[in-house]
Image: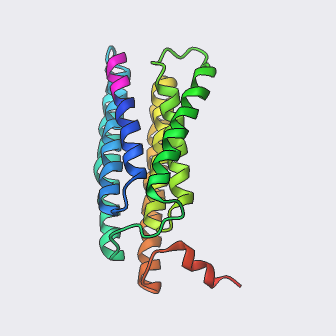
Amino acid sequence: MSLLIESAMVLLVLTNLTLLGLSRLRSCIRVVAVQGIVLGLLPLAAHADDLAPRIILLAGGTVALKGFVFPWMLLRALRVANVRHEVEPIVGYTLSIVIGIAGFGMSLWVGSRLTIPGAAAPPLVLPVALFTILVGLFVIVSRRKALTQVLGYLVLENGMYAFGIVLVGEIPMLVELGVLLDVFVAVLVMGIAIYHISREYDHIDVDELDALRG
């Protein structure tokens, strides 16, 4: 079980760093989809010795939503918005990767000094969950395209999901499904917003919307 979880954590780190270095939005969506599939399989790895029906249902629902439904919605929004690349991000891609590596180091340092009462998860789980949350926040504030910021929101939620699934093992199924539903609604609303922004203003660059103020 521990080896499977640690392998999943390594994949999360790699997908996070890959996302920070990509400019092509379609590739970014695919990376987040891979991350969603890895997270969907995480409950099976964390509870391999006791695969209750609720765990299997949660894993299947997570893989379906994070790995296929959300990416499909975002790819559809990408086609409607007719945009291909994140052009001139606030923070460049090389610097983003450097900041990401520094953030991972900081997450390792913070994780080594935090203890979760009653948790018996592998040591990588907490640092990687923190790192994923930081990457999501960084993508939200350092990218100009609304679609990329939606991806940042998804990565942020992925970090919280990884933290909860592995370190808090007794969350009721209703709460787990409620979180997934909240994310589903958020992505749906964001997709609709991107569609309307693109239709009205012929772009989804949130910086240019500042001109509408005042």
Q: In the rendering, at what x and y percent does residue 199 appear? A: 41, 83
The foreground one among 110 and 57 is 110
Q: Quadrant of the N terminus?
A: top left
Q: Is residue 186 above or below residue 57?
A: below
Q: Is residue 54 visible?
A: no
Asked if the stretch drawn in magenta spans residue 164, the answer is: no
- Looking at the rendered structure, the number of numbered marks drawn on it comes to 0
Most extreme residue toward the right is 214
Applied colour scheme: rainbow
Q: Residue at x 53, y 42 (%)?
A: 133
Residue drawn at point x = 44 percent, y = 33 percent: 173
Give the magenta part as a residue range. 1-7
Would residue 162 be seen by someone viewing this image from the given angle? yes
Residue plotted at (44% across, 56% down): 93
In this rendering, the answer to whether 35 lies above or below 55 is below
Left/right of residue 37 with respect to residue 195 in the rendered view: left
Q: Position of residue 142 (x, y in %)?
A: 54, 59
Q: Position of residue 28 (x, y in %)?
A: 35, 56
* Image quarter of the C terminus: bottom right
Whole-percent x, y for residue 85 in the image: 36, 68
Q: Determine the main secondary structure of the stretch shown in magenta.
A: helix
Up-down: is 94 above or below 203? above
Query: Can you tell which quarter of the image residue 25 is in?
Result: bottom left
Residue visible at 53% across and 17% down? Answer: 119
